Amino acid sequence: MPVLEPNPPNGQKKMLMVFGSFLAIFVIIAVIATIASP
C-alpha cells in the first residue's frame, strides 16, 4: 500500500492530517527556538 494516494480512505486521511499537523507544530517550535536563541 503506497504511503500517499490521490484519494486515500477516511482513516488514512485522518492519520495523514494528524501527522501533518504534528510535523507543522514541530517546524513552528524549531523556528521559534531558532529566533529566540541568542
Image (tube, rainbow, N blue to C red):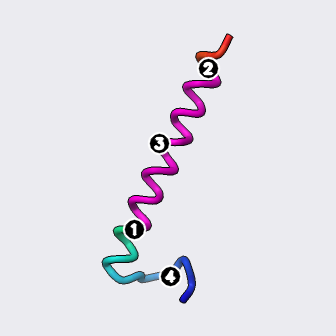
Residue located beneath label 3 in the image = 25
> Quadrant of residue 34 in the image?
top right
Magenta span contains residue 24? yes
Image disc number at residue 35: 2
- Real-space Cα separation, disc 3 to disc 4, in angstroms: 23 Å
**Image x and y of residue 27, in percent:** 56, 41
Query: Which amino acid type is marked by label 4?
Result: Glu
Instruction: Answer few, some or many: residues within 10 Å of disc 4's Cα (few below 14, many 20 plus, some between 14 and 19).
Output: few
Q: In what quadrant of the picture does the C terminus appear?
A: top right
The answer to the question of whether label 3 and label 4 lie on touching residues, with beta carbons closer than 8 A, is: no
| Residue drawn at the location 43% of the way across and 52% of the way down | 21
- Real-space Cα separation, disc 1 to disc 3, in angstroms: 15 Å
Q: Residue furthest bottom?
A: 1
Query: Which amino acid type is marked by label 2?
Result: Ile
Q: Which residue lies furthest to the right in this view?
A: 38
Report the number of numbered marks. 4
From which residue to which does the magenta span run? 16-34
Q: Residue 22 vs residue 35: left or right?
A: left
**Image x and y of residue 28, in percent:** 52, 36
Residue located beneath label 1 in the image = 15
Q: Which residue lies furthest to the top in this view?
A: 38
Q: Which of marks 1 and 3 is nearer the N terminus?
A: 1
Secondary structure of the residue carrying tag 1 is helix
Q: Residue 34 vs residue 16: left or right?
A: right
Instruction: Answer few, some or many: residues within 10 Å of disc 3's Cα (few below 14, many 20 plus, some between 14 and 19).
Output: few
